Image: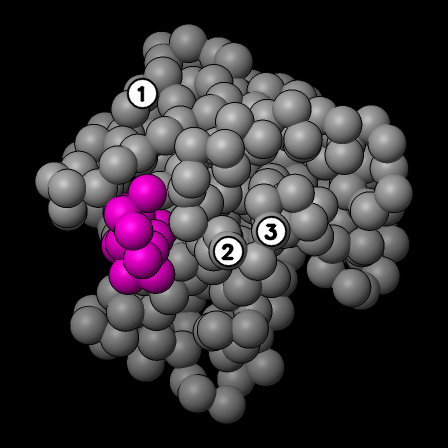
């Protein structure tokens, strides 16, 4: 057994969907979460800037004695994962490949849609992975640049005219194209599951990037004999690069628990 913690990072609050999945799938593990809330969103940044940010995020997390890292950010996973894996001597899990495998397992007509940040769609990583795993799959990608700032602002509920209008504009073309599976290629997007489901309808299966990365990590930990003791209580620590109050207020809603005075602010530029 290995009682060292697991590091998780994202540009802001979206990675909490991965934390929630990890706590359900690996409840005995201790998590250290970093949300780069001072520099959110990552989606419109250049590849060079994204790699710089990702290296700093990893450097901070590695100030702890970690056994693995989950990149709970679709943008970093699509642009920087391979570089980070080469530069670090511990397992680093991204969201792309496990999510694509899951999408291909549930699609009935091999028509898969992808919604993600602009940087992720530009990278072509989801599309390339899907086509490598199944050359016959038909892939349609759609950048959704307004989703992350709206989620970070708490606009995630049915009946909110702003988020529903934006979501309908993004999703209607994919629905009209006949997709039967939709990859939520950013870990912020599962927080919009109800709204996305309402628009896409029951004929479209949704695949969450954060959840699939949690299952992938479980497999890797088991294979490397890195699992914590089965009946350990687990836990989580939260760090951000901007105001803790803003993070705690929304994160408490996402995680279903009170995080008052639970998060700490760090200066990410030191890393």
Comes first in the chain, label 3 or label 1: 1
Residue 71: which quarter of the image?
top left
**Between residues 107 and 244, which one lies in front from this camera angle?**
107
**Between residues 82 and 149, which one lies in front from this camera angle?**
149
Residue bearing the label numbered 1: 123
Residue at screen point 36% across, 35% down: 77
Whether residue 169 sits left or right of residue 257 in the image: it is left
**Between residues 183 and 4, which one lies in front from this camera angle?**
183
Residue at screen point 63% across, 35% down: 12
Is residue 103 within the magenta segment?
A: yes
Circle 3: element type: loop
Looking at the image, what colour scheme do you see? one colour
Residue 67: which quarter of the image?
bottom left
Residue at screen point 82% across, 46% down: 157
Q: In this rendering, is residue 224 above or below 66?
A: below
Residue 269: which quarter of the image?
top right
What segment carries the magenta color? 96-111
Q: CA distance from mark 3 to mark 1?
A: 28 Å
Residue bearing the label numbered 3: 201
Q: CA distance from mark 3 to mark 2?
A: 6 Å
Whether residue 46 sits left or right of residue 200 in the image: it is left
Give the class, few, some or many, for how many residues have Cα within 10 Å of label 3's Cα (few <14, many ≥20): few
Residue bearing the label numbered 2: 203
Q: Answer yes or no: do the residues labelled 2 and 1 have beta carbons within 8 Å? A: no
Q: In this rendering, is residue 11 above or below 237?
A: above
């Amino acid at each position: 057994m290995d009682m060292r913690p697991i590091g998780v990072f994202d540009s802001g609050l979206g990675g909490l969907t991965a934390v929630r999945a990890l706590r359900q799938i690996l409840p005995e593990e201790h998590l250290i979460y970093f949300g780069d809330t001072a520099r959110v969103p990552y989606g419109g940044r250049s590849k060079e800037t994204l790699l710089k940010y990702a290296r700093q995020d990893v450097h901070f997390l590695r100030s702890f004695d970690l056994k693995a890292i989950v990149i709970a950010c679709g943008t970093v996973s699509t642009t920087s994962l391979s570089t980070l894996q080469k530069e670090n001597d511990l397992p680093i899990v991204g969201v792309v490949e496990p999510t694509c495998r899951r999408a291909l397992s549930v699609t009935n007509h091999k028509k898969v849609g992808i919604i993600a940040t602009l940087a992720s769609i530009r990278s072509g990583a989801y599309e390339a992975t899907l086509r490598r795993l199944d050359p016959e799959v038909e892939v349609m990608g759609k950048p959704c640049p307004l989703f992350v700032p709206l989620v970070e602002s708490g606009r995630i509920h049915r009946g909110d005219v702003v988020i529903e209008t934006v979501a309908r504009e993004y999703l209607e073309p994919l629905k009209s194209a006949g997709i039967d599976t939709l990859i939520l290629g950013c870990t912020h997007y599962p927080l919009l599951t109800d709204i996305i489901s309402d628009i896409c309808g029951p004929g479209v299966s949704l695949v969450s990037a954060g959840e699939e990365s949690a299952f992938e990590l479980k497999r890797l930990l088991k294979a490397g004999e890195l699992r914590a003791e089965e009946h350990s209580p687990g836990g989580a620590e939260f760090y951000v690069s901007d105001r803790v109050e803003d993070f705690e207020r929304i994160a408490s809603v996402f995680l279903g628990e009170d995080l008052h005075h639970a998060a700490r602010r760090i200066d990410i530029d030191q890393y």
